[in-house]
Amino acid sequence: MKEGSDLHPERNIEQYLEYENLVSRPGLLGDISSLLGNLGISINTINGVEKSRRGLILRTDNINKLRRFIYISQYVDDINIMKVRTPQVRDRLAVRHGRFIKRDEGDKKVFRFTRNEIGILVDFLAEIFSEKGHRLIGVRGMPRVGKTESIVAGSVTAKKKWLFLSSTLIKQTLRTSLLKGEYDEKNVFIIDGAVTTNSTSQAHKELIREIMTFPAIKVVEHPDLFIEGMHYTLNDFDYIIELRETEDQEITYEKHKKKHWFQNEDMDFFGGF
């Protein structure tokens, strides 16, 4: 649910607020909204994010107004403030879709999706692609689960041009050079880790190393294979995304470690939407 966001353009400080309903009573949300409004805080977006919890993207012109709300809320028995922070990508998606995306408890950079969540994955990628500067993203998944379609759709949503440096889309692609206009920090560079690792072209691998230092978004399918052949580590990645048909599907690499895997194994455009 969205509130008006253009009435107070001076309220340009964004914060994410999450609270738990301790007592579910009619009119509670209205009371909280009125209190925020009276303190000079606008609600940009609001939604339930977990059972009995609500997430809000707020806007204000003074962070002290939000501190005042938090202080007052300590004397309200009906709610418990859980989180207050600058909105993260995960927060924005939770408010937009009504639930948090799954995150690995041991490795906070690993995010998990199933094929029926491709719409959320596309939004997640689009948010990352909209950030400025270097981002290295790894995408794990079995053939035809929707990795490439999600990356391309995320690029479209973020209004970014995408370039395949290596892929098996339509035919095997191994770029060994880029045109001058393709060196653009706004582009999304897509690398198939299996294709690049198995390549014997030194010119291709030199291009990959060059782009890896370029301040732009890079997405590597099969990152575990990529690091084997290109001397990087998983620590170099900012995000690792795992995409499965079902939550219990195992991701394996036996087929990709063979030299004779075939093209078109992963492309099934928009089949997941």
Image: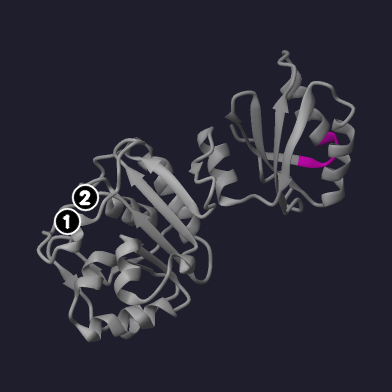
The stretch of residues the image draws in magenta is 37-41
Q: CA distance from mark 1 to mark 2?
A: 10 Å
Left/right placement of residue 162 relative to residue 103 reads: left
Residue 200 in view (yes/no): yes
249 above or below 179?
Answer: above
On the question of residue 178 being in view, the answer is: no
Question: Upstream in the sequence, badge 1 or badge 2?
Answer: 2
Q: Secondary structure at mark 2?
A: loop
Give percent across and percent down for residue 150: 33, 50
The residue at which mark 2 appears reads as 143
> Quadrant of the image for the N terminus?
top right
Q: Position of residue 190 (x, y in %)?
A: 32, 66
The quarter of the displayed image where residue 38 is located: top right
Instruction: Name the kind of residue labelled 1 in the image.
Output: Lys
Residue 255 is labelled as: 1
Q: Nearer the viewer, residue 153 or 267?
A: 267
